[in-house]
């Protein structure tokens, strides 16, 4: 006896016996459909990260982070520079932060200079460094320069190498 039938789940029978395809994912601001990467709480990354997709970090990163949109979990740690279009920071950062639209949550602890166009800081957040507002119509800012990324892989390790950006 089948516990779940297509009529009990509210699915329409398409004749193949398979459930209907899920609806398409909405497009993110950078035009990539439903693309995001997650660094889980049990992960430690040693080296720089460059991502064209949205990035969620709950683990530890010892290196620079460069991505379109960043969400940092409350228990995560980043030891390096952070560059992004949009970021919601909730963990610990030791390094500079260059973000166009920045939200710093109450659990965040930042040790380093912060460069931004738009910022929101929740009560309780800690920033030990200089805040620098950058107007939207100024020249190239740190968060506008995305260095190219190359990857190499063997059976045990995936290595991401980021080329250094040339000064503007």
Image (tube, rainbow, N blue to C red):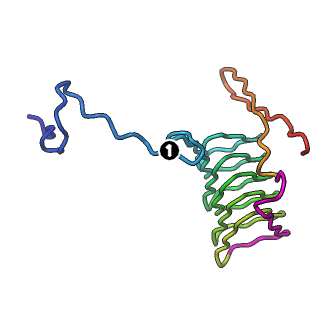
Q: Nearer the viewer, residue 13 or 129?
A: 13
Magenta-colored span: 125-141
The residue under the point 67% across, 25% down is 156
In this image, 77 relative to 36: left or right? right
The residue under the point 50% across, 42% down is 34
Q: Secondary structure at mark 1?
A: loop
- As for residue 58 lying within the magenta part, the answer is no
Residue 135, quarter of picture: bottom right
**Percent from the top left, x then y, of residue 122?**
64, 75
In this view of the protein, can residue 94 be seen by the observer? no
In this view of the protein, can residue 40 be seen by the observer? yes
For the N terminus, the quadrant is top left
* Main SS class of the magenta portion in the image: loop
Q: Answer above or below: position of 126 versus 159.
A: below
The residue under the point 61% across, 55% down is 71
Residue 11, quarter of picture: top left
- As for residue 140 lying within the magenta part, the answer is yes
Residue 10, quarter of picture: top left
Taking the view exactly as shown, the residue that stands out farthest to the front is 137
Q: Nearer the viewer, residue 96 or 145?
A: 145
Taking the view exactly as shown, the residue that stands out farthest to the left is 1
**Percent from the top left, x then y, of residue 72?**
63, 56
Q: Answer above or below: position of 109 versus 12.
A: below
The residue under the point 66% across, 61% down is 89
Crowd class of label 1 (few under 14; some 14 to 19; many from 20; radius 10 Å): few
**Percent from the top left, x then y, of residue 123?**
65, 79
Label 1, on which residue? Answer: 27
């Amino acid at each position: 006896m089948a516990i779940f039938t297509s009529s009990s789940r509210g699915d329409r029978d398409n004749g193949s016996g398979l459930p209907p395809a899920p609806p398409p994912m909405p497009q993110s601001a950078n035009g990539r459909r439903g693309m995001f990467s997650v660094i889980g709480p049990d992960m430690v990354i040693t080296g720089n990260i460059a991502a064209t997709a949205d990035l969620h970090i709950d683990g530890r990163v010892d290196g620079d982070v460069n991505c379109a949109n960043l969400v940092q979990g409350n228990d995560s740690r980043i030891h390096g520079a952070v560059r992004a279009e949009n970021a919601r920071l909730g963990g610990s950062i030791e390094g500079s932060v260059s973000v166009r639209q920045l939200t710093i949550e109450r659990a965040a602890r930042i040790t380093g200079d912060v460069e931004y166009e738009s910022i929101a800081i929740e009560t309780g957040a800690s920033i030990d460094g200089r805040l620098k507002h950058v107007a939207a119509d100024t020249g190239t800012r740190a968060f506008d320069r995305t260095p190219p990324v190359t990857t190499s892989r063997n059976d045990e390790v995936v290595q991401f190498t980021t080329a250094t950006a040339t000064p503007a």
